[in-house]
């Protein structure tokens, strides 16, 4: 979550009046590096996603997920986990996988909006999930 820039700008302005130029430049550099942290966190989440995916799929029966589901998930990962690619579960196994991955990723600190598990027309599995 990004914080408003106004407090940082006001702080830099006030400090520039009281600190030498070198200290002000250093402080400005430190305060403006938050986007670099965000990029690193995005990359970390994608790596965590791939690791959890490999671990989860290794415990699943072969062919538990469809080719379409696999291709959608592969496209999400190939984008660096940044593009909104819909990975829609249609079978009970795909829904169970999506639920487990969601729990694993949220436990790792990712928000639900990071996850690719979305169906454009809403969730409709082949069989009732209960």
Image (spheres, rainbow, N blue to C red):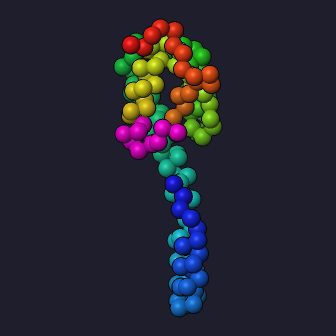
Residue at x 36% of width, y 19% of height: 59
Residue extending farthest to the top is 127
Q: Nearer the viewer, residue 111 or 37?
A: 111
Residue at x 53% of width, y 85% of height: 15
Q: Is residue 48 above or below residue 34?
A: above
Give left or right: position of 21 versus 109. Answer: right
Displayed quadrant of residue 124 = top right
Q: Is residue 67 visible?
A: yes
Quadrant (top left, top right, bottom left, bottom right) of the C terminus:
top left
Q: Position of residue 119 (x, y in %)?
A: 58, 24
Q: Position of residue 10 (x, y in %)?
A: 57, 78
Q: Nearer the viewer, residue 89 or 53?
A: 89
Q: Which residues are magenta?
A: 105-113
Q: Nearer the viewer, residue 33 or 89?
A: 89
Q: Position of residue 65 (x, y in %)?
A: 50, 15
Residue at x 47% of width, y 35% of height: 49
Q: Is residue 67 above or below residue 73?
A: above
Q: Position of residue 48 (x, y in %)?
A: 44, 39
Residue at x 51% of width, y 13% of height: 125
Give left or right: position of 114 versus 57. Answer: right
């Amino acid at each position: 979550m990004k914080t408003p820039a106004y407090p940082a700008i006001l702080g830099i302005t006030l400090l520039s009046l009281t600190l030498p130029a070198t200290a002000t430049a250093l402080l400005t550099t430190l305060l403006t590096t938050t986007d670099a942290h965000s990029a690193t966190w995005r990359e970390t989440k994608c790596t965590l996603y791939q690791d959890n995916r490999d671990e989860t799929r290794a415990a699943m029966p072969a062919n538990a997920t469809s080719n379409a589901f696999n291709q959608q998930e592969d496209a999400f990962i190939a984008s660096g986990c940044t593009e909104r690619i819909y990975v829609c579960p249609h079978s009970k196994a795909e829904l169970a996988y999506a639920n487990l991955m969601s729990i694993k990723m949220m436990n790792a600190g990712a928000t639900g909006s990071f996850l690719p598990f979305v169906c454009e027309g809403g969730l409709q599995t082949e069989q009732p999930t209960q």
